[in-house]
Image (tube, rainbow, N blue to C red):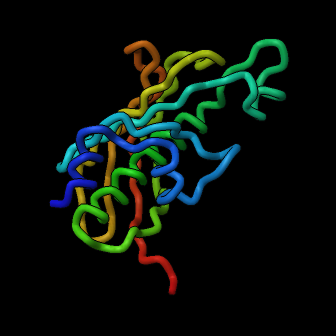
Amino acid sequence: MDDVVTKRVAQGFNIQEIMKHLPHRYPFLMVDRILEWDEDKTCVGLKNVTINEPHFQGHFPGEPVMPGVLLIEGMAQTAGAFCIAHSAQDGKPAPLVYFMTIDNAKFRKPVVPGDRVEFHVERTNRRRNMSWFKGRALVDGVCVCEAEFSALLAEKPV
């Protein structure tokens, strides 16, 4: 394993590295940093929630709450970064990662500007080009959202 990949395993990814791999951009990039990931199945992403995000203009005026679907998207993007990191580690070209299914989503507490959301994802199964995950979003160590979801890894078109 080369030093760059070893460093990423230990230190996670900064926003520039995330943007090299994920196609998402503002205002839809929901992960500011990958804090850690291991070689087997887990990854932790971070989102700093600010009042400047455009969804707060309408959700809800005077009482901003982050839409729950964006918490799910943050978990999916964290899982996508995890899958891409594994491809790089294996020497394969980075895949496109498509969010395919979501099950058992639960929204437990509102997320508001000023919160730091940690997205904890765990790959529970992998078969060919499909991966299944369990995800949790935490604020100050308290679960605010959880879900199970799957992703399809596809080769980028030439």
- Residue 29, percent from left and from top: 60, 45
**Number of disc labels:** 0
Write the residue at 34% across / 51% down: 82
For residue 111, above or below residue 20? above
64 or 44, which is in the foreground?
44
Q: Residue furthest bottom?
A: 158
Residue 65, placed above or below residue 27: above
Comparing 149 with 121, the one in front is 121
Q: Quadrant of the N terminus?
A: bottom left
Work out whether residue 82 or residue 147 is closer to the camera in this orientation and state it. 82
Q: Is residue 41 left or right of residue 111?
A: left
Furthest toward the front, the residue is 3
Quadrant in the picture for residue 84: bottom left
72 versus 86 height, above or below: above
Instruction: Residue 7: give x, y in percent of width and height.
Output: 25, 46
Place of residue 27 in the rendered image (x, y in percent of width and height, measured from the top left): 70, 43
What residue appears at the point 46 percent right and 32 percent down from the top-left corner?
46
Q: Position of residue 26 (x, y in %)?
A: 68, 46
Residue displayed at 51% across by 43% down:
15
Residue at 33% over, 56% down: 85
Q: Dividing the picture into quarters, in which one does residue 129 lie?
A: bottom left
